[in-house]
Amino acid sequence: MTSTAVSSRSEHRSFCRICAALCGIVVTVDGDQVVQVRGDPEHPFSRGYTCPKGRALGAWHHHPDRLDHPQVRRDGVLTRVSWDECLDDLAGRVASVVEESGPDAVGMFLATATSFDGPGGRVAHGLLSGLGSRSRYTALTIDTPCRPLVYDLMAGFPGLLPALDHDLTTLTVLVGTNPVVSHGHSHGMPDPVQRLRALSAGDKEVWVLDPRRTETAALATRHLAVRPGGDHAVLAHVLAELLGPGGGADAAYLAEHADGVDELRRAVAPFTRAHAAAVSGLSREQLADLVAAVRRHGRLVVQTGTGSTMSAEANITEWLAVALQVVTHSYEQPGGAWFHPGFLKCLDRRTIRPSGPEPDPVPGPASRPDLAGRYGELPCAGLVDEIEAGNLRALFVVGGNPATSLPEPARLMAALGRLDVLAVADVVATETVAAATHVLPCAGQLERADVPDYVDQYMLVVASQHTAAVVAPGAERRPLWWSMAALGQRLGIATLPSGIQLETCTDDDLLAAYSRRARRPLEELRATDGVLVDEGPVRGWVEQGVLPEGRWRLAPTVLVAQLTSLTSLTSHASLVEGPPLPAAATLEMIPRRQLRTMNSQLRDAAAPGGRTERGAVQLHPDDAGRLGIADGSAVLVASASGETAGTAVLDDSLRPGVVSVPHGWTDPHVGALTSATRGVDPLTGMVLQSGVPVTVRPA
Ligand SMILES: Nc1nc2c(c(=O)[nH]1)N[C@H]1C(S)=C(S)[C@@H](COP(=O)(O)OP(=O)(O)OC[C@H]3O[C@@H](n4cnc5c(=O)[nH]c(N)nc54)[C@H](O)[C@@H]3O)O[C@H]1N2
Ligand SMILES: Nc1nc2c(c(=O)[nH]1)N[C@H]1C(S)=C(S)[C@@H](COP(=O)(O)OP(=O)(O)OC[C@H]3O[C@@H](n4cnc5c(=O)[nH]c(N)nc54)[C@H](O)[C@@H]3O)O[C@H]1N2
Ligand code: SF4
Ligand SMILES: [Mo]
């Protein structure tokens, strides 16, 4: 990282850690004031691009509600205390809970910001493991648990992350993802408009399946305005065609590298053109065109996003998307997706022992026998029951805001209020911080050194970058790793790598330790001014080193069974139990991201001269007209689980019958419409957040 002094000002190269695009930024600092954040034109991936969130980093850093001091709740009031007082008190209470109720009574919710804080995330996870608690909750189970499940079942390893090959891919199919706004789901897409233009230039094509004509759809070759929850039918139909007499599947490859071809063919057989059209809401011509495009290109990349991963059909859609890429022999081939091994993780150089064909989940939370635990964590859907049942008595919230991100907010907030300990590590005061017993003020992203760690596999190629802290931590803020390690020390739990002492440890000491098995040592990364590219797409390691005997499992039994139970239903809405909603008035609610916020973050922080955003209830004008709702008017949205108030915005980019409500807000609070029990996926515990039947009426 370079620093150039211009009078009292200095410029620092860094990278933005709000979202997975990890754009290169140049931060102008005057004394301790962050005066400007702009895109770094020399960054090879973002090429000078930033979005309004990145440019608002200065406003975020100087936010009036920044947490400056540790606090402890005394006589009902959050009170400023010293770090020693806070950590001593917290350690004492956590130790008592463990002694009285066992380690599982202490839980942790590790969410979005932890993914962008390498050392903080690792030490926090280490503290929970050191306590011996299995009460680990992360944002994975309210986002995309279908992906690890499906790769575990089909490839024997849950940790695979497919990446687009931006140079060689000629057919990209995006299902329920809007990278122009989100900048990618489980992969980063910096500078998305230019990248999508390149992906659809000349003979290349981008197809978008989305009930909304999104910013991404507007740039695509074709937009298919699929009905919410209809994606699996589209993919099943394409597979049925490719595996049928018309062909298109790579039979020689399948014979050598796949099991379950016949079972897959049988499972997708019901999805004739007529049936797929009825379920997906697309025309037969649109389906025929997609089949023809897949045959024309031979290979393709399918990327799914939250529109499909939060739906009742999530596992099926993910499975069929993977199957389509296997059947066309797309994976690890030029033009198809490659699997990102990570610069730090180096998965391609590790020995991976594949799991068996039906990997057993571990039991879920004690109060929710219907839920399973997987991949070292419990589903967020069980969190509120665990607190209500008294099983969970102390909760750490690390880089998350469950008050806005989890279902059933009224019930959740009441439960959080009953905890013996609610320790919240954050950078600003949030709705969750307001309910805390202990507040741990964290150094924000400009106040700490870092390299991409959890998001290591989200980079465009196998690459990494180091940033030093741009400014020193203000007030009494400390890096997350420090507070977690200091607490561990009080509880007798070692959380730092061996040989590192808390008293002298720096961010870079930890980064160096965590980089020991990386593709290049931290020293080399630090010496690089910007991004260090190690290699481009790495192909072949999954087929050779991960797949059990080099073979994909195309038809996992549990997924075939789930598809069978779906196809026997006329509408996926009937999957949701509870009192039926009046049919004529029922709309289907879908999620969406907004450009100026990251979940609940930056709701009230804007770049200089920029603006902030609000959460609105988007409706199609035809539906609004029928329901007597005017643009900008107050509405009430209700589901079988609850009701929330919001402001209607009429938007003809939506498919009629669909209402789009973003999360991260308290007005509307979309969590009031979702449920911790109704419609929860039986395999993953995923909360149904896409395709939720709702009614909307004037307030
Ligand atoms: N600006 C911004 N960027 C973000 C975030 C943010 O809050 N703001 N959040 C970050 C996080 S945590 C995540 S997980 C990622 C998510 O990244 P994405 O998954 O790309 O999220 P969205 O941009 O909401 O795109 C989801 C799309 O799915 C569509 N959709 C809804 N239901 C269905 C359906 O049933 N079928 C289909 N085919 N489409 C459907 C919606 O209309 C929407 O356009 O974004 C990350 N990036
Ligand atoms: N109905 C519905 N619900 C949803 C979704 C949806 O689409 N619909 N989306 C889901 C998804 S995909 C996700 S990922 C979750 C998001 O759920 P959360 O992760 O709980 O949500 P965020 O608002 O991103 O919370 C991040 C918190 O980290 C804090 N923070 C920022 N920087 C730092 C830092 O450097 N250190 C620390 N310690 N904290 C920091 C922020 O102030 C904020 O309070 O919500 C989920 N909930
Ligand atoms: S897209 Fe925006 S929020 Fe994401 S890394 Fe780039 S500047 Fe930051
Ligand atoms: Mo997410």
Image (cartoon, rainbow, N blue to C red):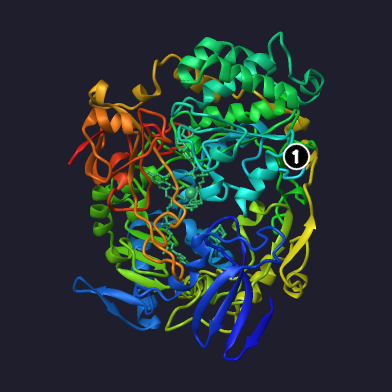
The percent coordinates of residue 597 (x first, y second) are 43, 57
Apparent side of residue 518 relative to residue 639 in the rendered image (left or right):
right
- Check the picture and name the quadrant holding the C terminus: top left
Apparent side of residue 682 relative to residue 276 in the rendered image (left or right):
left
Q: Secondary structure at mark 1?
A: helix
- Amino acid tagged 1: Val
The percent coordinates of residue 379 (x first, y second) are 43, 44
Q: Quarter of the image holding residue 685?
A: top left
Decide if residue 338 is in sight here. Answer: yes
- Check the picture and name the quadrant holding the N terminus: bottom right
The percent coordinates of residue 541 (x first, y second) are 78, 42
What residue is at 37 percent from the left and 80 percent from the top? Answer: 69
In depth, the one of 446 and 200 nearer the eye is 200
Decide if residue 189 is in sight here. Answer: no
- Eyeballing the image, is 521 above or below 266? below
- Eyeballing the image, is 222 above or below 94? above
Return the residue at label 1: 542
The percent coordinates of residue 279 (x first, y second) are 46, 18
Badge 1: how crowded within 10 Å, few (<14), some, or many (20+)?
A: many
